[in-house]
Each structure stands twice: as C-alpha cells, then as structure tokens.
Amino acid sequence: HSVWAEELKVAVASNFSVTMIRLARTFQEETGHSIILINGSTGKHYTQIKNGAPFDLFFAADRHHPKLLEEAGLGIAGTRFTYAAGRLVLWSPKDDYIDPEGKRLAIGDFRHLAMANPQLAPYGKAAREVLEKRGLWHILEGRLVRGENIGQTFQFVKSGSAELGFIALSQIKSPGTEKIEGSYWVVPRSFYEPILQEVLLLKDSPAGRDFLRFIKGEEARKMIQSFGYDTP
Amino acid sequence: MDISALWLTLKLAGLSTFILLLIGTPLAWWLARTHTRLKVIIDAAVALPLVLPPTVIGFYFLVALGSKGWIGGVLERLGGRPLAFTFSGLVMGSVFYSLPFVVGPLKDAFSAIGRRPLEVASTLRARPFDRFLTVALPMARHGYLTAAVLGFAHTVGEFGVVLMIGGNIPGETQVLSIAIYDHVEALQYDQAHWLSAALLLVSFLLLLVVYGMKHRRKKEAFR
Amino acid sequence: MDISALWLTLKLAGLSTFILLLIGTPLAWWLARTHTRLKVIIDAAVALPLVLPPTVIGFYFLVALGSKGWIGGVLERLGGRPLAFTFSGLVMGSVFYSLPFVVGPLKDAFSAIGRRPLEVASTLRARPFDRFLTVALPMARHGYLTAAVLGFAHTVGEFGVVLMIGGNIPGETQVLSIAIYDHVEALQYDQAHWLSAALLLVSFLLLLVVYGMKHRRKKEAFR
Amino acid sequence: MIEARFRITRGTFILDVDLQMPSQGITALYGPSGSGKTTLLRAMAGLDRLTDGYLKVGEALWQNAHYFLPPHLRDVGYVFQETTLFPHLTVRKNLEYGFKRVPVNERRISFDQAVDLFDLEALLHRSPRHLSGGERQRVAIARAVLTSPRLLLMDEPLAALDLKRKREIFPFFEQMNETLEIPVLYVSHDPNEVARLADYMILLNAGRLQASGEIRDMLTRIDLPLAHDHDAGTIIEARVSAYDPRYHLAELEFIGGIFTVARQALPLGKKVRVRVLARDVSLTLERQSDTSILNIFPAIVEARSDAEHGQTMVHLNAGGASLLARLTQKSVEALGLSPGKKVYAQIKSVALLE
Amino acid sequence: MIEARFRITRGTFILDVDLQMPSQGITALYGPSGSGKTTLLRAMAGLDRLTDGYLKVGEALWQNAHYFLPPHLRDVGYVFQETTLFPHLTVRKNLEYGFKRVPVNERRISFDQAVDLFDLEALLHRSPRHLSGGERQRVAIARAVLTSPRLLLMDEPLAALDLKRKREIFPFFEQMNETLEIPVLYVSHDPNEVARLADYMILLNAGRLQASGEIRDMLTRIDLPLAHDHDAGTIIEARVSAYDPRYHLAELEFIGGIFTVARQALPLGKKVRVRVLARDVSLTLERQSDTSILNIFPAIVEARSDAEHGQTMVHLNAGGASLLARLTQKSVEALGLSPGKKVYAQIKSVALLE
Ligand SMILES: Nc1ncnc2c1ncn2[C@@H]1O[C@H](COP(=O)(O)OP(=O)(O)OP(=O)(O)O)[C@@H](O)[C@H]1O
Ligand SMILES: Nc1ncnc2c1ncn2[C@@H]1O[C@H](COP(=O)(O)OP(=O)(O)OP(=O)(O)O)[C@@H](O)[C@H]1O
Ligand SMILES: [Mg+2]
Ligand SMILES: [Mg+2]
C-alpha cells in the first residue's frame, strides 16, 4: 500500500474496457488508489490527448498511437510497453456454422461477413490479412460490412444481420459477460501480424508507475489471459 | 470513393427528406388539429427517439431488422430482402431519427394558419383534401422550408444510425459523414479537412439557394 | 456512476436549452425581421454545422478549444481555464450543434406573428423591447415549445460532439448517452437496455408534462 | 322557403332560434351587436358542426339531428365579417378560387362580370396584403358571388364601403335576387341599408328571434324598435305611370295617389318601392299652395302612439296606403290630431329618392 | 395646430398631402375607398418610417427629414381598421396593456370609466377570440382611449357598431374633445356620422388633399361632393334659450331665429349644433298656418346650383345663417326661386334631432 491514495484517469481502448474494469478493481483494492476509466476509441483518445486531455495513462488498441504520442513528447519516454495481444476469432451465433478450420469462409454461403474497418482498427487489419492469406479478399470484398471498431463488428454479428464476422476472442471469452453461444474458429497466430496493444504513461506519478508495475505483474497477466488475450 | 460517398449522401438525404415530408405532413396536420389525450402521447413519442444516442438507436434498429428481430422477422416471412446493410435500411433509419425535426416545424406552421382560411375555402366549395392542398400547404411554406432544411442537414450529418445499420459498405451505404469520420479516426486529417470543406461548401450553396428563393419571395410580398 | 451521468445529462441539456433559447431568440428575431443579403447567408450558416458528423464537429471544436486553437489560445491569454474536457466546453459544443433546431422554429414563430400586433403594441406605448417581451414572446410560444423540445432532446441524445470535447470523464463530462454507448460497446447489453429504458421513460414523462401543459392551454383557448 | 332551427351554446351566450325566410329575395338579419347574427350565419353555412340543428333550403335538407351536409357541399356564398382573403394568392387567384370549383354549367355569373361590377380590374394582379380595407371587402364579396351560390350569406359586407360604392353595388344585389334568383341573407346595422335593400327581415335580440316578416310590416310595427327609430318609415309599392324628361320627374302611382319623384328615366309600368320616412311627413289641416312640396295627399289619422321625449308617431291612412308621421307632441295637440281626423300629408318629393 | 406633410409611394399609389388640422376637436378624414386614409393615419402614428415626412403636433415636432419620433413615444391612440386585439391576453389585459404604460399623472380617464362607457364589464375575463365583431371594436376603442393620447387616430372605429351603440359612444367623443381636450382624427364613410361628430374635415381623393376646413363650410361647398350628397346639409350653431318640459321642447336661438326642437332637457345657455339637411327644407311663398311644422323662417334665396337629375340646390340666407334646400327643378320654376327672392323655409323640427 502506498502512503498517499491518488486518483488516476486511465484512457482505455473499448475492446479492453471490460478486462480493465477487473484489473482496476484489483489494483484499487491492493493500493487504495482510485482509478477512473475512460472508454473510447484509440483514435479519439489520441486526438484528445494531443489537445490536452487530462489523462494519466493511455491503454491503446495498437502500438501506433502510443508511439506517435511518445515521439511527440506527450508521454513519459520509456514507459511504453505491450500489455496484451489480441486474438482474432471468426464467430457466428449459429451453432455448428463455423468449423474449427474456418472453411465456411471459402464455402461462402453467407450474405455478409463482418469485420472491423482495417484502416482504423487493428483487428480489422488482422482480419484483412487472414482473408488475403487465404486468397479470399477479392472474392469476399463485396460482402464485407465494416464496423468502426471491434465492438460494433460484434454487434453486426450478434444481431444476426451479418451471419459471421471476425471479432476478438476477448469478446466471447469474457468471464464477466453472458455465456456466448454459437460456433467459432480461433484464427491461428501465424495468419496475421500480432495485434499488440501498448500502454503509455502520460503524466508521471508514483501511482501511475505503480499501476504499470501491476500490469506487468503475474497476477494481472493471468487475468488478462483469462479474458482471451495473449500477454508478452 | 469519396465522390460516390457524396452522391450517396445526397441521395440518402434527398430521399429521406422527401419521405420525411411525406410522412410528417399528415402526422403534423393531425397533431395540429386534434385535441385528444392521445395527441399528447404521440406528440411526446415523436420527439422520443432523439434522446437516445444515434449509435444506440442504430443498434436497436439493427436488432429489430435482424432475422430474429420483429421487423426483420416479418419481412423475412413476407419473403422480402433483409434491410440491414442496405440503402433502404439507411433511409428507414434516417427517417425515423429525423422525424421530430420535420414534424415540429410543420405542426407549428399548420397551427399558425388558424381555422379561418380553411373555413373560407370550405365556403368556396373546396373539399377537405382540396383545401389542405391549396390553402394549408402554401400557407405553411415557411414551416416546410425549416423542416426540409433541418431534416436534410441532419440526415447529411448524422452518421451514428447510418453507420450501424449500413455497415459502411463503399458505394452502397458509406455516406460522406462516415468517410470523413474514418479519415479523422485514421489521423488522415488532410483528407478529412478537404472532405469537410467540400461538404460544407456544397451544403452552404444548397442552403443559399433555398433560403435565397424564400428571401426573394418574401421581399416581393413586402413590396 | 450512471446516476451521476443522468444528473449530468439533465444539467447539460437543461443548461444548453436555456442558453440555446437565449441565443436563439435574438438571432431568430433578427432573421425573421430583416431582409438584407446578409440574412440569407446567416440563415444558411446557422444550419451548416448540422451537415458535419458530430464527432468531426467535436474534433474541430477540440482543436479550436485546445491551447493551440484560436478559441483556446484567446482564452488562455485572457487567463481563462481551457474549455476542453470541462462541463463548460460540453455546453458550448452542444449549444453550437443544436442551434439550428432552436433557431428554425423560433424564426417561423416570429414570422407568423406578422407586423400588426407589434404595431398595435407600439401605439400602446410599448417600447421595442417591451413589445418583444409582452407580445412577440407569448405569441410565439408554440415555436418556443417546439424549439425547447427539439433542443433538449437533441442535447440529451447527442454524444458525438460531447464525447470528443468532453473526453467521457465519469462524473464530469460523461453524460448518459455516452454511458449507454459505452455499455453497448462493452457488450454490457443489460445495463445498456436498462439505461436506455430509464432515459426514455424520464424523457417521455418530461415531454408528456410539457405537451400536456400546452394541450390544456390550447383546449382552454378553444372553449 | 328556408327553414332553420338552431340551438347553440357559447359560454354564457345561447342562440336559440326557429325561423323561416323566403328562398328568394334579400333578407336582412338585423339586431344589436352581440345578438348572435354571426353565430347564426356560421351555423347556416355549416361551419360549426352542431348536433342540435335543422336547416332546409328549398327542397334540400342541409342538416338535421342525423344528417349534416359539410360546408363545401352546401352551395353557400359566405362573406365573413372580418374579410379574409387568401394571403398567398393574388386577387385574381382569390376570385378564381371558388369560381373554378363551380361546374361550368352551374355558373350564373361570369368572371368578367364580377370584376366589372366590383371594379377590380386594377387590383387583379395585386397581393391582398396591399389592398385598402374597402378594396379587400369588394374582393371578398366578388369571390363569394362568383361561386353562384344558392344562398348568399353576408356578414356586414358593406361596412367598409363608402356611400358611392354602396350605391354602385346595391343594384347588383337586387339583380342577383331578381335575375339570378340567389337569395341573400344579409347582416346589417344600418336601417337605411336594410330598408333600401331588404324584402324580408329577421330581427335577433340576445340570441332569440324577436320578430321576422316582410320589411314593410316590420318597419311600421310599433312593438319593434325599428318603428321608433330615427329612420322609421313605411314602404309603399308603386308603379311608374309617367315620366317628364324636362324636369326629370317620374310619377309613381300608388293606392293613395301619385308620387312625384325626381329620378333618372324610369320605364313606364315598372314596379318600384318608395320609402317614406316618418320624419319627412308633415301634416297640415288645409292643402297648401305655393309650396315646394309636390307630394301632398289627403289622409286620415288612424292612431297615435307616443314616442319618447315629446314626440308622437301618427299613423295615417292615405287612401289605403299607410304612412307614419313623426310630430312633436305640441303640434299634435295644436292640430288636434285624434283618430278619424282628416289631414293633408306633405312629403317632400326628394325624400323619396332612395 | 397639427401640421402634416407626407409623400408616400405604394406601388402605383402615391399619397402626397400637406395639411393642417386644429389640435383640438374632432377632425373627420373623409374620402372614397382607396384614397389613402389608412396610409395617412399610419404615417401620422409613425408606423411607416418615411424619409419624406413632416409632422408637428402642437408644439411638438414628431418628425421631419432629420428626425423621427418612434410610434411608442408619439402619444397617439390608434384604432386600426381591422380590429386587432392581442389574442394571448384577456379583454381586461388588453385594456390594461396601454393603460399601465401611461404614467399615473398623465392618465385622463380611469379604467372603470372606460369599461362603463363601452359597456365592457361582462367581457373583461373573456378571450378576444370569442367576441363578436362589435364587441371587439368596442374593446379596441376603449384600449386606445385608455392611453390618454394627445391625438386619437381612428380608422372607421364605428363601422361594426349598431346605431344604438354609436349613439351611446358619440357623446363620449365629444366629451373627449371638450373635457379631455384630446383631438381626434377620425376616418369615416358615413356623412351622417361625420356631420354629427366632426368639427373639422379633411377630404382626401386619390392620395391628394381635395379640401379641408370647418365642417360647416365643407358641407355647403358646392365644389365638393358632400354638398351634392343625399345627406347634404348645413350646420348651424345655436344656444339653448328655453325649455318647455311639458312638450319636451327646447328653443334654440340662432342668428336667424329660434329653432324648436323636441329633446330631453337641455341646460339653458348650452351651445349646441343643429344640422339641417337640404332635403328636409321645403320652401313656401307664404307663411303657412295649421301645419305640424314648427320651424318656419323667412329667408332670401342667395344662389341656385343645379344638382343632377332634375334637382336643384337652393342656397338660402336666413337672417345670416345659411341653409340649403334641395328641391325639384319643377318647384324651383313654379315658385320662381331666383336670387333675391323672399321665401319661407320650413324645417320639420324633428329633423333637427340629431
Ligand atoms: N366562448 C364564448 N363564451 C361566451 N360568450 C361567447 C362565446 N363565443 C361567443 N360568445 C358571445 O356570443 C354573442 C354572439 O356573438 P356573435 O358573433 O354571433 O354576435 P353578432 O350578432 O354577430 O355581433 P356583431 O354585430 O358585434 O358582430 C356575443 O355576445 C359573444 O360575446
Ligand atoms: N404595395 C402597393 N402597391 C400598389 N398599391 C398599393 C400598395 N399598397 C397600398 N396600395 C394602394 O394604396 C391605396 C390607399 O390605401 P389605403 O389603405 O390608404 O386606402 P383607404 O383610404 O384607407 O381605403 P379604405 O377606405 O378602403 O380603407 C389603395 O388603393 C391601395 O390599393
Ligand atoms: Mg358578427
Ligand atoms: Mg383604410
């Protein structure tokens, strides 16, 4: 326990927010610091930080944005590291629709395939790589519906509007939410560049450093893994 | 890509505005002239969608339109194509969401006419629909202008609902507002600025023409 | 957390509506009664923000409000606190974005009064501001109702601008619409449904009260 | 015959009438302000939907307890008390509004005819906003007339018109009545106008029918306010029997003699009405000569009714025609005017003009 | 003295007047429909901001080329041609609107006084929407009067009122003029009303000042339409010299003799105006006896002007007072009425009532 209880404003990428709630609760119990979570898309957070947002920590959904901020001198140099790596899943709420090898993609008997926008979201970029690797990109391009982020992509599929979609493993594995039904294919890591999510300390403070230390710790890594992420 | 998005945007906004005025007219007329308890409820219900965030509306819409949702289910049973991720779905969502912006001004415009001009028309042999067309409509033209401008502009700018229902399919459901948004999110500020400027300019010119026409008419009326 | 978001939402919407009516009134009054070329331009300019996606507006606002932006820069030089990520910033953004929904109906309402009642008031010794308060305002009350409802509801539901400018800080700038949005994004559908339902209910009751009052008054007027 | 029965409650005001009026000619609806004239007209036009009403125009039932013909099917022309022109239409379009909606074969007046009569040529392209009060009213009357109605309802249509205009329009209403056979129900406050124009009269007071009947009878009935009015008088039917173009004098034969009236040429044999105001009649005991008064008739005093403030109304029988003379109490006593007394009634010919 | 000079262009219509009117008494603004009466009134109230105008009321300059006093500072009361009550206020609130805005020490009429006079007690809590036409007009006049204006402008304020109401309200305007010293500029189409009420008269025609002057003179000027009117006549100033309560007869002394008039009691010495209509005057060569006519005066024919259609207007001098008599051409010739001829003018006393 630290001597002074501090308050940390933590900007966290939407895809990681459920996991972060659990992490933060544990950290708060252990240290007495309080954490205010600010959900949002990494792009928005980036813009806001550039324009003076009062955030202490930035948990991004990619490596790109924290790196830019660090280079711009808006973060504490040397505090940037990878806290999680996302896993891509091809999922459908229908049972037995997706086989463990994901051959359904090639069969192509669906109207819409959902994925995140590859220009904006790392999961989208990864999904695109998978399709390209399988040589299906040009075939399926016309049937793609693209969510702004991975959360929206999930909603496309969940509502049944798209029959299947590439989403994050964390979205169907979260212990905190309802049991996810349906069928899925966990895409092998070799099919796409790792989806590395990095954190950056924006304002130096003992509590901030404490939190980074906690994230790196064994307890936190276990927790992160239990939500469907890889950890370095 | 951006040209097709512009075209799609104008098509969506134009069509939505048209449908909005079409639906809004009888609704506003009825609201302006009835005095039942029911009216108050409908009055409130029309403005209600506004209080939900567009994305959330979009989400509920998506759920309703999906094959398990009640709209989607009914449509499917009737053999229709599902509406999600189609242009028709976009139109439907936009209309639903912009309705209060059209109904409000129209209702006020109809109220402001009062009963007298319609009574006069009825003693001049005009049947109800006839006097609606030849007296109520032209006398409510200020309200129509406001309603059309608000409905059109809101549809152009709105993207929460559209994003959700449309699925951002280039050439089909990717409107300009989404394109701009995407550019901003992707830190492609130059493109975003450029597109925003273009959109603003086109809209400004459009609005100038519309208001300019009204202005000319008013000036005439005062001379 | 969600209770504070509800409170914040009502505070934001209430305050914004108030300021909107305050700013919208002279603007609408001027627009309804002037006939210069400038008027057409302002007319169009007021509706213009609508055509940009809210997040993008928020983005530009953020840039302007930031210490490097022109509003922020001026404010800073004047020794003021920066507006971004504060409640005041939210209010400013909301007001800017909802302005057309208030100005439109007010403008129409003022136009509908015509010159005669104001002329009568002037021959009864009422100075310009007096006759505005005692004749124009009460006679435009339909327009005020519509404007207030649209402005309020739109501010409640709007979240693009607010999200961008406010930074979604719980208890400070996290309004209900963002909270709902967050829940949906975080797949916490139960909470999202629950919050949406609560928001809808509260808003519906509020609207019922407002429209019910109007209804009663109208009924009286007809008896 | 037009039969109307209405019971209408408006706040504390109740209109409760059961009346009949001829389905031709001009009927005046007369009564003080607030007596329910507008309310009655609106009910007849079907503008206020009333459960408790009955209206039959000629053979056509317009409404009863179970049936209600909406206004646009009623074939009425209505001139509202506050002239309401369509502000979004030009004067021409306003006039055409009703005209175009009447089937061609039912039109009994042409567009140009109405424009000429009401002198609207110069206004046709104008917006109603910029018309003067009287101009607006002329347009409103013309617009109503152009629908060739089966019943023309007019709520003080001439109030904003000057005398000259009124005189130009009066003959048209008579013509409407005679050649077009359009019955007119006409609200007016002006007893002169009523006496001049109307054939029949309905007298409303505080929402009730006070009296109704032929205008002749109504003007002399002492139980009604009209006979006590400053403009009280009688109406006498006459026939043109001669015309002297040199002096522009017409001779009008009536039951009690011959009126000599300065007039433009009148066709021989034409039936005319002559109004004799009580205040224009003076009585002498001897026939006077060397007087400018041309119309002197022997008459017999029939009755006297005391009017107020020292004035007396003397009822005379001039060879069968009834005349009223309003005299001072003093004169009545000085001349000993009791029933049966023979007198000479002097009427200034020019007083018969109107 | 009120001096007004305006030049106003409205489309093809041009109002171009330069006029003076007394700053006390009642001035009638008379002219055919469309002659610019409303336009003039609006300009005087300052409702249309004109560059080319000059207006001075008494000592106060209200506008000239460089100065413009806005309407709310002009102390005018204005009764609009189309009565406009505030629809969102009750009748009481409407009346109070102007009243409350006048400083207490400048008020010259109390709220209750106005309510009584215009009989508005029963309407006070009502909404203007549900008033009859006449009721609305009464409220509008009362509202304007309650501002205790320095100039009361009224655009046909009595058009929708019945005779009885008019008669009730007339004396009030006279009182306004006498005790309150509020000058009134009054638009009317009704020559009777004008003659009865006005002291001064402005005659507009097609946007130009045709004539203006004392009402006495205006009514007899043969170059003006009024003298040819059916209601042409003269106005004679008189003084009450006796009253006979038995016969309710007042004797009014004027320059040419004594009028005998049936009236309610009149205070001795009171100055009154008597209107003698040309059509009420008949001429005889001998003084007649045994007649009901009480007012017979010797007079001398001064001039003759041919009116139209066989009628002649004979100008008489009755001991200094001028009278008009409208006779038929035939009578004029029969009696040999050329200038200088001595005659007796007979005037029915009751014709002097109004
Ligand atoms: N809602 C109401 N409450 C009370 N009284 C009402 C209401 N509506 C109408 N009245 C009264 O009904 C009476 C009749 O009105 P109406 O308009 O028929 O009169 P009118 O004979 O046409 O009078 P005018 O000659 O002044 O036009 C008026 O005294 C009016 O005040
Ligand atoms: N914009 C315009 N264009 C052409 N003529 C106009 C315009 N505005 C007013 N006029 C004309 O000016 C004339 C004077 O109008 P005004 O209202 O002063 O007449 P008025 O004397 O009050 O008549 P009324 O007795 O009928 O009320 C009318 O003939 C009217 O048609
Ligand atoms: Mg009426
Ligand atoms: Mg006028």
Image (cartoon, coloured by chain):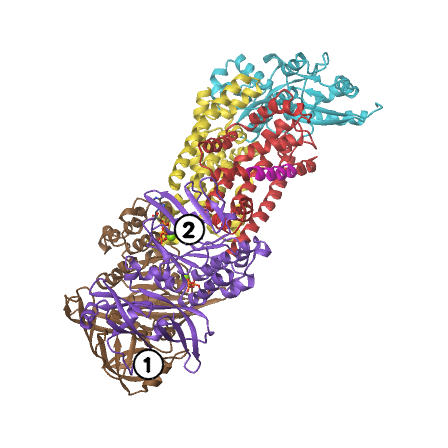
Chain colours: A cyan, B yellow, C red, D brown, E purple
Q: Is residue E14 left or right of residue C173?
A: left
Disc 1 crowd, CA 10 A, few/some/many (<14, 14-19, 20+)? many
- The residue at which mark 1 appears reads as D314
Instruction: Give the magenta part as a residue range.
Output: C9-24
Element at label 1: strand
Disc 2 crowd, CA 10 A, few/some/many (<14, 14-19, 20+)? many
* Amino acid type at image mark 2: Leu
- The residue at which mark 2 appears reads as E41
Picture coordinates of residue C109, whole percent (x, y): 49, 44
Q: Which mark is residue E298?
A: none
**D67 over C105 or under it: above or below:** below
Classified by dominant secondary structure, the portion drawn in magenta counts as helix
Front-most of B203 and B61? B203
Q: Is residue D220 left or right of residue E56?
A: left
Q: Image quarter for residue E199?
A: bottom left
**In the image, ligand 3 is in what quadrant?**
bottom left
Label 2 residue near ligand 2, CB within 8 Å: yes
Front-most of A193 and E133? E133
For the question of whether residue A138 can be seen, the reply is: yes
Front-most of B202 and D30? D30
Q: Image quarter for residue D292?
A: bottom left
Element at label 2: helix
